């Protein structure tokens, strides 16, 4: 039997780095500091048939894999298996840029601050077949930092994958590329599959120096073409300010963000997982936050966990300090098995800053300008929702007095036709611990009224929207929750058929903004507008009607 012919290409992850191109650059400075001079790792200058750069390779060996202890305890056997993690990184200079090619865990060796975060999607917008998209990961402009991922085995358009909505930033897209003169396609193979994140391209690259350099030139040429291709326009509706001559604007936005980091009531600040960490969220058992000698390990990450490292810094120093904070995911509570490299703290936050009529969004360490069509479409949809008539009439909620939500709900329940459900939790096997609070008040026509005083920005409203969605999902899909809720309604209202409430439920979101500001599209941050519309769509999909009622001071 003849030996199998070696393939001319290999699937490779390619990154473009933010670094000067000239020969004066020390490529070793682009390597993550903890790998420089590390035992078991070597760095070798490369100048081979046109490929000029630096090769860094190595492995981390453990005499015993960390999971051996668990298996030993479970089985009584003495489990002894060595662990080894191998990494390869090739830094390559061209006339236009510096690139990183990685193998194994080699991507951990790149200094994250050097990644060109627009590279992957810049290529995708110019090269992907609009009808050959197989996966899209997007981050919704939502104070909860929500991420969703849709995929299909056959490929289709963005609309087929349900990603036409304009209020999102795409961080990963996979599909078939249009005709490109790459080694893979010139060898007579079928269509080229490409996976692009915000910072990388994963595709087959040539193995020989000549083939590899040719493929790199093809990618560079593709990135200079006009964008986007027809059918990919929705991916460009939120535009990065990087490399667009907006230096003064970015400086002003950074100053606003610096102020937000020191303000515990900043309304437009939220937590967000970086794109390269999104797929590891379910595996994560511990998260380590580091700055200098200070180290904090948490199970669940909150924005205040990160902000505590910088909030006491003087004005103008918080954002720069945050860039020196590192956050890393681990698969074990002892923080020995890393799922990600240490990623700068500023890439874990999102922020919204309104600058006159413009709206800007901080995500993954960069500022984005939200297109005018997005702002207008968002405002129109929210205005329509806020103008829907409602049969619910609620009392005033005075400012300045010690009036919390408990007080307000009790006041509202004194009105004819309203019943208090606040803290009347439904306890089932599904909702252990405190149980589930279906609503705060039951309205005259059986409306499920959820109340929130949004005096701390977007996070409070996101909690309200999550409560509404969870309550309707539970009533729709959990028999035990539904039965207990209906029994409570029957007890309070013996003359009303409780089943009528759930036939076509009406969810009323009662909102009082800080200082009693009128509730309009302009008084809600984009985080909250997007979250409100997403919640409304989800509830309507479950057969519920949604109304929003302002509560005045």
Image (cartoon, rainbow, N blue to C red):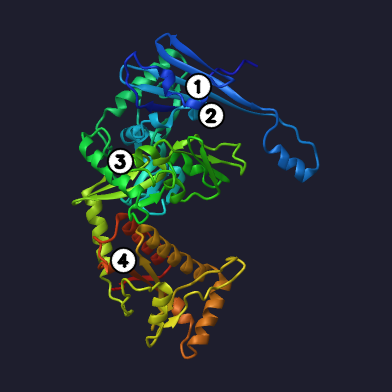
Residue 284 visible in the displayed image: no
Does residue 508 appear to the left or right of 12 in the view shown? left
Q: Secondary structure at mark 3?
A: loop
Quick one: label 3 or label 2, which is nearer the N terminus? 2
Distance, label 4 to label 3, CA atoms, is: 29 Å
Q: Which mark is residue 513?
A: 4
Q: Which mark is residue 36?
A: 1
Question: Dividing the image into 4 quarters, which one contains the N terminus?
Answer: top right
Q: Secondary structure at mark 1?
A: loop
Q: Secondary structure at mark 4?
A: strand
Q: Secondary structure at mark 2?
A: loop
Mark 1 neighbour density, 10 Å: few (under 14) some (14–19) many (20 or more): some
**88 or 228: nearer the eye?**
88
**233 or 57: nearer the eye?**
57
The residue identified by callout 2 is 105
Q: Are marks 3 and 2 in contact (CB under 8 Å)?
A: no
Residue drawn at x 39%, y 29% as measured from the top left: 114
């Amino acid at each position: 039997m003849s030996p199998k012919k070696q393939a001319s290409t290999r699937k490779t992850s390619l990154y473009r780095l933010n670094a000067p191109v000239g020969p004066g650059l020390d490529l070793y400075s682009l390597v993550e500091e903890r790998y420089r001079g590390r035992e078991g790792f070597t760095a070798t200058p490369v100048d081979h048939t046109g490929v000029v750069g630096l090769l860094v390779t190595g492995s981390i060996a453990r005499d015993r894999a960390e999971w051996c202890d668990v298996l030993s305890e479970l089985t009584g056997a003495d489990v002894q298996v060595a662990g080894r993690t191998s990494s390869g990184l090739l830094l390559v200079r061209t006339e236009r840029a510096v690139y990183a090619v990685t193998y194994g865990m080699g991507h951990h060796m790149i200094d994250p601050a050097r990644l060109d975060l627009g590279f992957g999607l810049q290529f995708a917008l110019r090269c992907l077949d609009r009808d050959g998209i197989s996966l899209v990961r997007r981050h919704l402009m939502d104070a909860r930092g929500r991420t969703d991922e849709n995929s299909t085995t056959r490929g289709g358009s963005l609309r087929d994958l349900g990603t036409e909505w304009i209020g999102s930033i795409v961080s990963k897209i996979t599909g078939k590329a249009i005709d490109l003169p790459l080694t893979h396609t010139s060898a007579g193979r079928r269509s080229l599959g490409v996976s692009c994140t915000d910072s990388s391209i994963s595709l087959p690259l040539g193995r020989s120096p000549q083939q590899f350099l040719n493929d790199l030139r093809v990618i560079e040429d593709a990135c200079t073409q006009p964008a986007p291709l027809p059918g990919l326009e929705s991916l460009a509706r939120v535009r990065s300010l990087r490399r667009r001559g907006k230096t003064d604007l970015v400086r002003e936005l950074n100053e606003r963000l610096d102020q937000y980091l020191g303000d515990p009531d900043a309304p437009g600040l939220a937590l967000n997982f970086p794109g390269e960490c999104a797929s590891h969220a379910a595996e994560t058992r511990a998260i380590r936050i580091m700055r200098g000698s200070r180290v904090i390990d948490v199970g669940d990450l909150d924005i205040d966990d990160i902000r505590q490292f910088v909030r006491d810094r003087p004005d103008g120093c918080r954002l720069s300090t945050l860039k020196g904070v590192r956050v890393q995911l681990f698969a074990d509570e002892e923080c020995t098995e890393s799922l990600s490299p240490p990623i700068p703290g500023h890439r874990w936050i999102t922020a919204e800053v309104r600058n006159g009529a413009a709206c800007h969004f901080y995500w993954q360490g960069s500022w984005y300008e939200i297109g005018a069509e997005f702002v207008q479409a968002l405002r129109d949809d929210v205005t329509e929702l806020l103008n829907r008539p409602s049969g619910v009439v609620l009392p005033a909620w005075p400012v300045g007095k010690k009036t919390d939500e408990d007080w307000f709900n009790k006041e509202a329940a004194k009105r004819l036709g309203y019943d208090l459900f606040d803290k009347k939790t439904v306890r089932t096997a599904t909702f252990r611990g405190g149980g589930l609070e279906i609503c705060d008040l039951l309205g005259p026509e059986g409306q499920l009224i959820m109340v929130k005083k949004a005096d701390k920005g977007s996070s409070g409203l996101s909690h309200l929207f999550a409560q509404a969605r969870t309550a309707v999902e539970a009533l729709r899909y959990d028999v035990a929750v539904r039965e207990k809720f209906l029994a409570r309604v029957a007890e309070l209202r013996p003359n009303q058929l409780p089943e009528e409430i759930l036939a076509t439920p009406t969810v009323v979101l009662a909102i009082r903004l800080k200082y009693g500001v009128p509730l309009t599209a302009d008084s809600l941050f984009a985080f909250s507008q997007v979250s409100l519309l997403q919640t409304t769509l989800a509830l309507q999909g479950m057969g519920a009607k949604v109304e929003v009622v302002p509560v005045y001071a």
